[in-house]
Image (tube, rainbow, N blue to C red):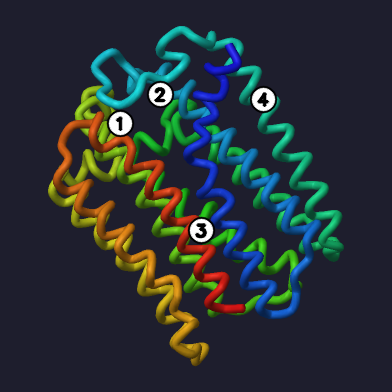
């Protein structure tokens, strides 16, 4: 039973949540605004949001038929009957509450003024709704091909930019560049998932970007995501006038190239599936080396 819940949580996706908050924390530290307690609460809030998204997707795809017996990727726990739909609904509600509570503690710790507090709280509630409605509801937006935009905004721009602001109390437009890096890499992980499931998604009426584009163009889209993510960080450091050690993150380029080659060449889902985890870990490695680059 515990193993089934661990599988539903999908631990391999959590490095992405840590990477996005880590990037915001690194940028805040570089600007002299690092606050450990705020960072830890950012991690707690974002990780619970990621878990919420994973649980909600497991439930929603099973209900809407994307997790049918024809799905080529790993079977989900609701689809297998390992966890009942009712138990998963309860878990989704509890995880949403935990995420909200963590977010409120985060905003209180950040000592925001009233208007900014309510703005961030509204964004947090919107993030919870986005996590649940991706594959749930009458017309899940993930089934219409808008999942990539949501992931880019919530796990890229808002996660990085929000973490930075909650620690420093200021806005720096340049932060959009490394936030774009994380957003693109996170979307790329989703894209690998959707390329893997392209046939079963098509049959279930789930019109993800790869379903709309076709596999060949989805691979090109994948390459553009990886390239944009890397070049955005490079431009950020170039504008900052960073010395040569400031480009240490470029050492991760072979990892992303390897991922692109795998996505292009491996046509069987079983062969492509491990590269979701590898891309998530590559993104985390990118953030770690970026941290050494800016400090």
Neighbourhood count class around disc 1 (C-alpha, 10 Å): few under 14, some 14–19, many 20 upward: many
Residue, x 60% and y 16% (percent of image)?
2
Circle 3 residue: 156
First in sequence: mark 4 vs mark 2: 2
Which numbered mark, 3 or 1, is in the foreground of this view? 3
First in sequence: mark 3 vs mark 4: 4
From the viewer's perspective, is residue 56 above or below residue 186? above
Q: How far is the residue under mark 4 from the one under mark 2?
A: 17 Å
From the viewer's perspective, is residue 203 above or below residue 249? above
Q: How far is the residue under mark 3 from the one under mark 1?
A: 24 Å
Name the quadrant containing residue 163: bottom right
Circle 1 residue: 206
Residue 124 in the figure: left or right of residue 224:
right
Circle 4 residue: 93
Which numbered mark, 1 or 2, is in the foreground of this view? 2
Q: Are marks 3 and 1 in contact (CB under 8 Å)?
A: no
Q: How far is the residue under mark 4 from the one under mark 1?
A: 24 Å
Q: How far is the residue under mark 1 from the one under mark 2?
A: 9 Å
Name the quadrant containing residue 183: bottom left
Residue 253 in the figure: left or right of residue 54:
left
Q: Are marks 1 and 2 in contact (CB under 8 Å)?
A: yes
- Residue 61 has which mark? 2
First in sequence: mark 3 vs mark 1: 3
First in sequence: mark 3 vs mark 2: 2
């Amino acid at each position: 039973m515990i193993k089934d819940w661990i599988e539903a949580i999908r631990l391999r996706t959590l490095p992405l949540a840590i990477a996005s908050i880590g990037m915001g924390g690194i940028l805040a530290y570089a600007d002299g605004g690092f606050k450990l307690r705020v960072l830890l609460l950012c991690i707690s809030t974002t990780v619970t949001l990621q878990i919420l998204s994973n649980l909600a997707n497991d439930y929603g795809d099973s209900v809407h038929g994307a997790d049918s017996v024809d799905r080529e990727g790993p079977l989900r726990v609701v689809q297998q009957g390992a966890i009942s739909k009712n138990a998963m609904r309860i878990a989704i509600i509890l995880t949403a509450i935990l995420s909200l509570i963590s977010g409120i503690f985060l905003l209180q710790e950040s000592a925001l003024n009233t208007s900014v507090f309510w703005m961030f709280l509204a964004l947090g509630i919107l993030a919870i709704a986005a996590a649940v409605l991706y594959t749930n509801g009458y017309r899940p937006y993930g089934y219409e091909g808008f999942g990539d935009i949501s992931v880019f905004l919530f796990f890229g721009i808002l996660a990085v930019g929000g973490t930075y602001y909650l620690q420093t109390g200021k806005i720096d437009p340049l932060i959009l560049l490394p936030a774009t890096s994380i957003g693109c890499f996170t979307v790329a992980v989703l894209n690998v998932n959707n390329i893997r499931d392209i046939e079963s998604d098509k049959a279930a009426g789930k019109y993800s970007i790869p379903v709309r584009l076709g596999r060949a163009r989805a691979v090109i889209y994948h390459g553009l995501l990886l390239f944009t993510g890397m070049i955005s960080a490079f431009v950020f450091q170039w504008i900052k006038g960073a010395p040569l050690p400031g480009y240490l993150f470029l050492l991760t380029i072979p990892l992303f190239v390897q991922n692109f080659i795998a996505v292009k060449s491996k046509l069987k889902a079983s062969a492509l599936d491990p590269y979701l985890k590898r891309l998530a870990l590559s993104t985390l490695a990118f953030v770690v080396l970026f941290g050494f680059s800016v400090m």
